[in-house]
Image (spheres, coloured by chain):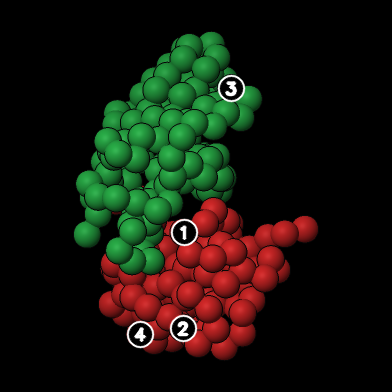
Chain colours: A red, B green
Amino acid sequence: EAQVTQNPRYLITVTGKKLTVTCSQNMNHEYMSWYRQDPGLGLRQIYYSMNVEVTDKGDVPEGYKVSRKEKRNFPLILESPSPNQTSLYFCASSLRSKETQYFGPGTRLLVL
Amino acid sequence: GIQVEQSPPDLILQEGANSTLRCNFSDSVNNLQWFHQNPWGQLINLFYIPSGTKQNGRLSATTVATERYSLLYISSSQTTDSGVYFCAVEGTGGFKTIFGAGTRLFVKA
């Protein structure tokens, strides 16, 4: 089944403890992206990747890192999480930029 | 950057009613998508529609790129249509995706 998977689905952590949210797609898509969703603000793009080893900032990249070492994986790294990073995170992929994006199930993160 | 505005912000319908949701964008786009976020938080693709008209069952969408707006039509609404509807665009000048704030729809039985 073609899909985008994210792990973990739910995470509670404390301020400053590094964490990684994984994202994987099995559709051989070139374009991958991370979003955060906060009440009243819709979804905002954090980082995107056009292909392996090609990443760029979205609208809210501060406090996040990404890497794209393999085509199928695009992990989101929070080196030192803070409470304002408490949010619902989505990973998405598309065959190429400017084509239909498919979203993962989301990861709910609470930073205490 | 591109601004995306959706209206109305909230909508309550009686089951069986029709509705039109609007998405305005401030600049030229290469990509426009409509999504439905169900009450469990899942984002579901509805349409990829940078221009023209598409239909899928009770849903249809029209994008008039030259006038910078898109419309999503829901006919004979059902309770399962409840949730939040988002439009998202990618501008011609870059590769970022910008979402509107969404329209929250509640369909009463």
Q: Chain of mark 4?
A: A
Q: State the CA–CA distance, disc 2 to disc 3.
A: 40 Å
Name the element at disc 2.
strand
| Figure check: B91 above or below B21 | below
Q: Nearer the viewer, residue A29 or B10?
A: A29
Q: Within 10 angstroms of label 4, few (less than 14), some, or many (20 or more) residues? A: some
In the rendered image, which quarter contains the N terminus of chain A? Answer: bottom right
Q: Chain of mark 1?
A: A
Q: What residue would you read off at disc 4?
A: A80
| Figure check: B94 above or below B62 | below
2 or 3: mark nearer the eye: 2
Q: State the CA–CA distance, disc 2 to disc 1.
A: 16 Å
Using residue B12 as the reference point, say whether residue A72 is left or right of it. right
Q: What residue would you read off at disc 1?
A: A98
Q: Within 10 angstroms of label 3, few (less than 14), some, or many (20 or more) residues? A: few
Q: What residue would you read off at disc 2?
A: A54
The residue lying at 52 percent from left, 69 percent from top is A32
Using residue A28 as the reference point, say whether residue A101 is left or right of it. left
Tags 2 and 3 touching, CB below 8 Å = no
Q: Chain of mark 3?
A: B
Q: State the CA–CA distance, disc 4 to disc 3.
A: 46 Å
In the rendered image, which quarter contains the C terminus of chain A? Answer: bottom left
Q: What residue would you read off at disc 3?
A: B58
Name the element at disc 3.
loop
Q: Position of residue B44 (x, y in %)?
A: 56, 45
1 or 4: mark nearer the eye: 1
Q: Chain of mark 2?
A: A
Q: State the CA–CA distance, disc 2 to disc 4.
A: 23 Å
